[in-house]
Image (tube, helix red, strand yellow):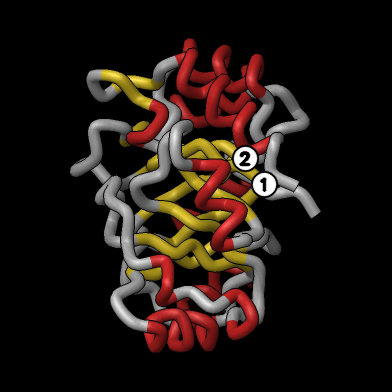
Amino acid sequence: MSVKIKLCGMFREQDIDYVNEALPDYIGFIVMFPKSHRNIGFETALRLRSRLDPRIKSVAVSVNAPLEEFAEYVKSGAADILQCHGSEDGEYIARLRELTGAPIIKAVRVTAQSDIERAQTLGADFLLTDSGTGSGKLFDHSLIDPVKINRPFFLAGGLTPENLAETAKRVRPYGVDLSSGIETDMVKDREKILAAVREVRRVE
């Protein structure tokens, strides 16, 4: 099965134009997390989603967000999937699924293999392995043993169009996730987006 690609942190209308041209599998909106320069409001998420090619799934990404407000992104049609990037526990994830029926991605900061093992007990549909909360840095991929991961996982952290294909072949994730790696001066870069998707499509 080919590796999926998720491009995260869309916040401008031209970002949606770029991804519609590139056609990744997923894109992400950062919501209810004002610390990020990529953070967008509810109305902006709806507007950007309305421009998105229907072949691309949208993911609302937040950190310890209020349950009801986070669920509204799926209920409104702004997102197909929800991504929890904080300290959300199994009870939170179960309640979110109950409210929305949507797939849920749980991000896990990988410092040891036990971090992944613990995250697998929380009941999310997908994991996203990263070095931190959007740190943009590579972590020790030897800590990932795909055989021991019992659900599909995205690989994030420090990925760029230049290292994407090689890393995906080595780690064999379900999908890869990029944000800062497809930016220039903190905004999405059309050429980097096109290059990232092109590189992932080469990986069999």
In this rendering, does residue 47 appear at all? Answer: no
The disc at residue 26 is 2
Question: How many C-alpha atoms fall within 10 Å of the one at disc 1: few (<14), some, or many (≥20)?
Answer: some
Residue 29: give x, y in percent of width and height: 46, 38
In screen coordinates, is 109 left or right of 4?
A: left
The disc at residue 4 is 1
Q: Please name the residue shown 64% across and 27% down the image.
A: 198
Q: Please name the residue shown 38% across and 61% down the image.
A: 130
Q: Please name the residue shown 67% across and 46% down the image.
A: 4
Question: How many C-alpha atoms fall within 10 Å of the one at disc 2: few (<14), some, or many (≥20)?
Answer: many
Give the farthest residue toward the right. 1
- Quadrant of the image containing the N terminus: bottom right
Q: Earlier in the sequence, mark 2 or mark 1?
A: 1
Position of 172 relative to 148 (above/below): above
Name the quadrant containing residue 63. bottom left
Q: Mark 2: which secondary structure?
A: strand
In screen coordinates, is 193 left or right of 198?
A: left
State the separation of the CA atoms marked 2 and 1.
Answer: 8 Å
Query: Which marked residue is nearer to the observer: mark 2 or mark 1?
Result: 1
Question: What amino acid type is highlighted by mark number 2?
Answer: Tyr
Observer-nearest residue: 24 or 88?
24
Marks 2 and 1 close (CB-CB < 8 Å): yes
Position of 182 relative to 6 (above/below): above
Observer-nearest residue: 98 or 16?
16
Position of 107 relative to 185 (above/below): below
Residue 106: give x, y in percent of width and height: 48, 67
Q: Mark 1: which secondary structure?
A: strand
In screen coordinates, is 102 left or right of 38?
A: right
